[in-house]
Amino acid sequence: MTRHFLAISDLDPDQLLRLIRRGRDHAAADPRQESRLGLRGLSVAQLFYEPSTRTRCSFELAARRLGADVLNLDIDTASTVKGETALDTAMTLAAMGVRLFVIRHADAELIRTLADALPPGCAVLNAGAGRRQHPTQALLDMITLDEAGLDPAALSVSIVGDIRHSRVASSVIAALQTLGCRRIRLGGPPAFLPETTPPEVECHDNLADTIRDADVVMTLRIQRERMQAGELAGIDDYHHQWGLREATLAKYAPRARIMHPGPMNRGVEIEDAVADGPRSLILDQVRNGVAARMAALEWLAEENQR
Amino acid sequence: MTRHFLAISDLDPDQLLRLIRRGRDHAAADPRQESRLGLRGLSVAQLFYEPSTRTRCSFELAARRLGADVLNLDIDTASTVKGETALDTAMTLAAMGVRLFVIRHADAELIRTLADALPPGCAVLNAGAGRRQHPTQALLDMITLDEAGLDPAALSVSIVGDIRHSRVASSVIAALQTLGCRRIRLGGPPAFLPETTPPEVECHDNLADTIRDADVVMTLRIQRERMQAGELAGIDDYHHQWGLREATLAKYAPRARIMHPGPMNRGVEIEDAVADGPRSLILDQVRNGVAARMAALEWLAEENQR
Amino acid sequence: MTRHFLAISDLDPDQLLRLIRRGRDHAAADPRQESRLGLRGLSVAQLFYEPSTRTRCSFELAARRLGADVLNLDIDTASTVKGETALDTAMTLAAMGVRLFVIRHADAELIRTLADALPPGCAVLNAGAGRRQHPTQALLDMITLDEAGLDPAALSVSIVGDIRHSRVASSVIAALQTLGCRRIRLGGPPAFLPETTPPEVECHDNLADTIRDADVVMTLRIQRERMQAGELAGIDDYHHQWGLREATLAKYAPRARIMHPGPMNRGVEIEDAVADGPRSLILDQVRNGVAARMAALEWLAEENQR
């Protein structure tokens, strides 16, 4: 059976730990080292039905560092002009010899349908789908915690912001729980809290209770479009109530390390002093993003070559 | 004299057979094999003045598997902003060291003009031009027939759809006739039949007569834009009269294999059961497209290196 | 301290001569030679906030010929959708392991700010900024003069056209003066002459006085947008007064070699007979552009690796 990487919850703790270890090895390695070209001769296609330069570049660098060829499909130009379905696009690329499909799409079901339809030997990596799944983001966060010497099983983790619409949040919660994390708190304005609270997770309606004594605080990107749509009172108001500021952290969560999936809205969900200060793990997350994607690509290539 | 690949009719039977054999070798080879990097250090530029993700990806994979660098020029962004002519663009790229030019353009004459103007050692591959020429598409179709054990000289081939506006059709007819095919039938609504019937070819005004007892039926993509422009009565009507359906094929052409240059309009010129059924050679065509382009690129690189 | 390449005037004569020599070596080398892969394993990102296919392709070919990976960021799509600042984009790419940043931006100050902010080991190449700086263009022009056997210290160089808005002109003037050139004349309509004449440079209001007995005449691209905005009387008028025509050159500057940074407006600032004639160094400039960028990339990679 072909192995894909569609959701973090598809992995058991051992599988996730192996991927974390593999990612840490890549993060520690010299990018100029020739011997890591494990994907040489393999073709990777990136199908991004939602734009994300950051994630696309991270996957592209990961694939190229492993020696793969990378095809970037600009889907706006590509399929709308001639009206080809996503399934025909994927099947066509598979027939052309593409073996690894990095796909971002608003519809998580579609990605699973593609994975089921592709011929044996072709693997799908979910690069962000729907509101729930962004498995490589969760993997890079776990690699970053591990690198910082933080064991999820012993941590209190707080997630702040638009939890409801965030595939980052739900993927990270799943990864943390897989690794035994027992204390996860979520906080944000009512419209941003999840409709159904995940098991063993607390929700709060104020920042102090959300982050008090947390070891790790992850804040999420506020989509300005939502604010313009009137779901939020305003940017200043959000920053005042939910923005991560050094003064608040010093008071309520003095030892907390800070994470953010990027790109940041500085002055909205986070102030510069926090983003760029000593608590911040944000650039480590970006760095480990490439390593996480190398680990995931390499793992799928190996699993499907047997 | 520099060798280009502008039209299938520029090749004599021996040259075409050699390209087919070369393409079959590439199709059979393992893409991860290092020894095929015959274009290493060569730069290929893709100039697509009409969008075609499918053909661009096919050429890009072909070039990369041979070790070449590939530059993709987004011509909308590129030349309209600064108003450079296609000739200056090509001459500039040649001066930068590009040796192989993969060009798609609405104007077939322009491609020939570029080929004539480029300095020695620079070769042009026509990736689709005007209404007549798409030589690598014809090549991949011949490779696919060969692989399926079908000898064009002994075949009855039917082509259905918008023949008049199709460079695929005219290129395939030329390739089949070069290889000795004696029975080619064309069929479609009156507005889609060619203004001048090619020699030794029959035209029909109904599907049954077009495909009766054919060995191979190739159907062409219906451009929805044409239907919207009122040239066709409607999609349902077209599907009813000219769409390839398993029931019709079983009745009139029971042993026929099916080809389509893609991308398909499912439910218009072809139904799912035919596209995805055992008669279909459609994904073989896509797979052999990469092999055909590898063969063509390699051939031009060799011819022009002497 | 990290070494960047932001302005030609940052180089002393020895440094500039070393870069010219290095560029000439690359220009003379066989692109298929394997041993020049000095950037293998390094990642280069191209951030073009103003479109320029020509410069982007030149850098891309240069980087790939040295074995680097190249990421092209389409900034329109990229950063406007999610509103990330240029600084966060650059820091993110640096965290992903990008070491060389090729940046074009309307604001020269911004490029310097990015260079200052990036972590050690990350170098910025200015690929055109503001109205003053385009250092690799000046470098390729100096390589082209050297290759043509022309020593700047002994030359009379004339620059014709829109000097005021041209970063090419000001960069070339700086390079020529660094190499000891004592006779530089500028000419163009009043609205195109510089607000402040650089030291030891003459300005003229007619073509004859600008180019009389010059060894080299460089003409600049007329931006049609400016003409439409009414800054110029009209295209025909400009061509009549300031266009380089063989008849004028034969009369006033019979031994002059002609340069143009491209892309050309044929029939406006230059006629075909001059652009394509024996005086023209224009395609040599394009060819040497790749060599110049190879020299610059390699130099920065070496300087920052120590």
Image (tube, coloured by chain):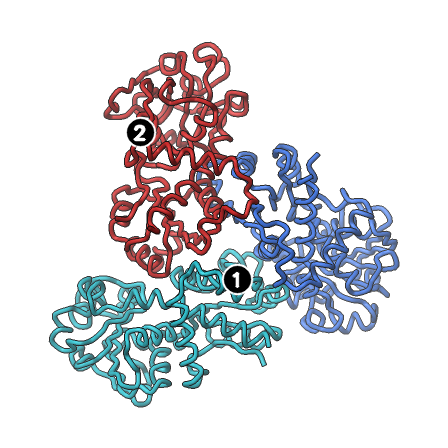
Chain colours: A cyan, B blue, C red
Quadrant location of residue B260? bottom right
Q: How far apart are marks 2 and 1 (CA)?
A: 43 Å
**Crowd around label 1: few <14 · some 14–19 · many ≥20 (10 Å):** many
Res. B210 visible in picture: yes
Residue sitting at x 41%, y 85%: A13
The residue where tag 2 is placed is: C174
- Quadrant of the image for the C terminus of chain A? bottom right
Residue B83, image x, y percentages: 47, 36
Depth check: give the residue in front, B186 or C6.
C6
**Labels 2 & 1 near each other (Cβ < 8 A):** no
Left of C97 or right of it: where is B260?
right
Amino acid carrying mark 2 in the image: Ala
Pick the quarter of the image with the N terminus of chain A: bottom right
- Seen in the picture, residue C139 relative to A94 is either above or below; the reply is above
Does dot 1 land on a helix, a strand or a loop? loop
**Pick the front one: C235 or C298:** C298
Chain to which mark 2 belongs? C
Point 34% across, 65% down: residue: A286
Residue A166 shows in the view: no
Q: Where is residue B230 in the image (x, y as percent from the top left)?
A: 63, 54
Q: Where is residue C152 in the image (x, y as percent from the top left)?
A: 38, 23
Mark linked to residue A68:
1
- How many numbered discs sit on the rendered protein? 2
Q: Disc 1 is attached to a residue of which chain?
A: A
Q: In this view, does C168 lie to the left or right of B74?
A: left
Hey, what amino acid is under mark 1? Ala
In this view, C126 is above or below A204: above
Which residue corresponds to the image point at 39% horizontal and 36% vertical from the top-left? Answer: C19
